[in-house]
């Protein structure tokens, strides 16, 4: 309208800044991030393990995937490199954990990995122990 009626040509941002300076237009309020409760660590080793794969160029130009399992209570890590994040790779690392540390109670995995569906819970009984996989 300024250009048509008054012959004044302004950039949109200039006009918007002037409107803000005279408090003619309110700035959008910044939304506060949702407060999240920090979860404490588990009390005992093996109560919760977290598993994820990390594909990167770890060794030069060739891409490889580090599949790692971390114990929530102790921060102990068991990991191995594979060509990609596959079921066999994940199961091999799980086997190493079970063989060396025993059966765990819960395994958390992300939904992007091989376990797929969000919030999937897979339960397994192994020698009388219940093992749960929870996809977050």
Image (tube, rainbow, N blue to C red):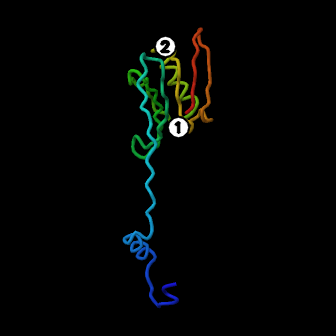
Instruction: Identify which residue, 114 or 19, lies in the foreground.
Output: 19
The image shows residue 63, relative to residue 44, as above or below, that is: below
Quadrant showing the C terminus? top right
The residue sitting at 44% across, 33% down in the picture is 37
Q: Quadrant location of residue 76? A: top left
Marks 2 and 1, how far apart in space? 26 Å
Instruction: Identify which residue, 115 or 86, lies in the foreground.
Output: 115
User: Which circle's residue, 2 or 1, is located before the other in the chain?
Assistant: 1
Where is residue 48 drawn, in percent x and y? 48, 22
Picture disc at residue 118: none
Where is residue 102 drawn, in percent x and y? 49, 13
Q: Secondary structure at mark 1?
A: loop
Q: Which residue sits furthest left?
A: 21
Q: Secondary structure at mark 2?
A: loop
Tag 2: Cα neighbours inside 10 Å, few (<14), some, or many (≥20)? Answer: few
The residue sitting at 57% across, 27% down in the picture is 134
Where is residue 101 drawn, in percent x and y? 45, 15
| Tally of numbered tags | 2
Tag 1: Cα neighbours inside 10 Å, few (<14), some, or many (≥20)? Answer: some
Where is residue 70 drawn, in percent x and y? 43, 26
The image shows residue 12, relative to residue 131, as above or below, that is: below
Q: Which residue sits furthest front?
A: 23
Tell me, yes or no, whether the two marked residues, 2 and 1, touch with CB atoms within 8 Å.
Answer: no
Q: Quadrant location of residue 112? A: top right
The residue sitting at 62% across, 18% down in the picture is 124
The residue sitting at 44% across, 42% down in the picture is 56
The image shows residue 116, relative to residue 46, as above or below, that is: below
Observer-side mark, 2 or 1, equals: 2
Picture disc at residue 102: 2
Residue placed under numbered mark 1 in the picture: 84
């Amino acid at each position: 309208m300024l250009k048509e009626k008054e012959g004044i040509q302004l950039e949109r941002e200039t006009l918007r800044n002037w409107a803000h300076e005279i408090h003619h237009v309110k700035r959008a309020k910044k939304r506060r991030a949702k407060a999240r409760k920090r979860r404490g660590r588990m009390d005992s080793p093996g109560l919760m393990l977290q598993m994820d794969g990390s594909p990167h160029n770890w060794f030069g130009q060739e891409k490889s995937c580090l599949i790692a399992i971390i114990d929530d209570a102790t921060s102990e890590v068991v990991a191995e490199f594979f060509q990609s994040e596959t079921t066999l790779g994940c199961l091999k690392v799980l086997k190493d954990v079970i063989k060396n540390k025993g059966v765990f109670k819960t395994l958390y995995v992300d939904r992007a990995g091989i376990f797929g569906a969000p919030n999937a819970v897979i339960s397994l009984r192994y020698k009388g122990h219940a093992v749960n996989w929870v996809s977050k």
